[in-house]
Amino acid sequence: MNKRSFFFAVLLCCVAFINAQDKKTSADSLRTNFKEKGIVVEGKIEKKKVDPLGPSKAAFYSAILPGLGQIYNRRYWKLPIVYGAIGTGVYAYVYNDDLYDRFRTAFKRRRAGFIDDEFYDVNGSGIVPGSPDLSDEALQDAQERYQRDRDLALLITIGLYAFNIIDANVDAHLKQFNVDDDLSLDIKPYLEYHPITSDPNYGIALTIKF
């Protein structure tokens, strides 16, 4: 064996030894970590169980009551966001619906010939027949504007409700995403000799574990 071959043989042995020590250290560290979490059974690492119905349960709970799926996923910090967003949408809907009803009622009474609606004498200067503070056209424009705002608030609220369900479902999926040590990429140098000429061959071995 020439000096070059001997050198690479020693180098390969050193790399293999260091790699073995690293794997042992990683395995010991992983075992300790799992032990602290209480999922070591008789010295063997037991993988975390995956609940295939978990995402469906989270989505179902959020569909019943917004935020319940986030509680199921233990994402408690999302509750203020969920209730704040949906609560704002509901408030905007109720606010615009109330104004829409008020202007619509006044507009209908005007068309029926009454002058006793709340918008006829807004300034409190006295009711003068034929001289309302808000004209019929202003009442019609106001009710149409608040109707549009009400419908938009409703659509936004429904969208936020649906997003709450989607978030719970996706979050439950991500919590069960497989990130254990069985998924690994290992790169090693190798040295082998030709069976006939005994010439050394150098290379790199790429190992992917699923």
Image (cartoon, rainbow, N blue to C red):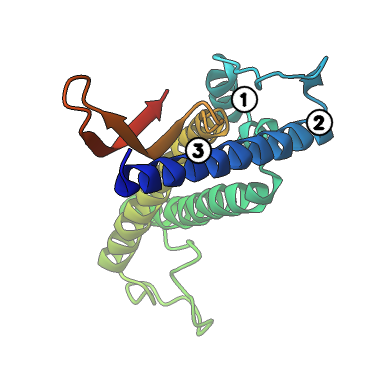
Look at 68% across and 41% down and name the residue there.
Answer: 25
Comparing 31 with 76, the one in front is 31
Amino acid type, residue under disc 1 in the picture: Tyr
Is mark 2 in CB contact (under 8 Å) with mark 3?
no
Taking depth in this image into account, of 43 and 18 the one nearest to the observer is 18
Asked where in the image residue 191 lies, by quadrant, the reply is top left
Q: Residues within 10 Å of mark 2 (few under 14, many from 20)?
A: some
> Picture coordinates of residue 72 (x, y %)?
68, 30
Observer able to see residue 22: yes
Mark-to-mark CA distance, 2 and 3: 28 Å
Earlier sequence position, callout 1 versus callout 3: 3
Q: Which numbered mark, 2 or 3, is in the foreground of this view?
A: 3
Please give the residue where the numbered disc 1 appears in the rendered image. 61
Element on which disc 3 rests: helix
Report the disc number at residue 16.
3
Element under disc 1: helix
Q: Amino acid at mark 2?
A: Lys
Q: From where the camera sits, is residue 67 visible?
A: no
**Pointer 2: what residue?**
35
Q: Amino acid at mark 3?
A: Ala
Marks 2 and 1 sit apart, C-alpha to C-alpha, by 32 Å
The residue depicted at 43 percent of the width and 70 percent of the height is 120
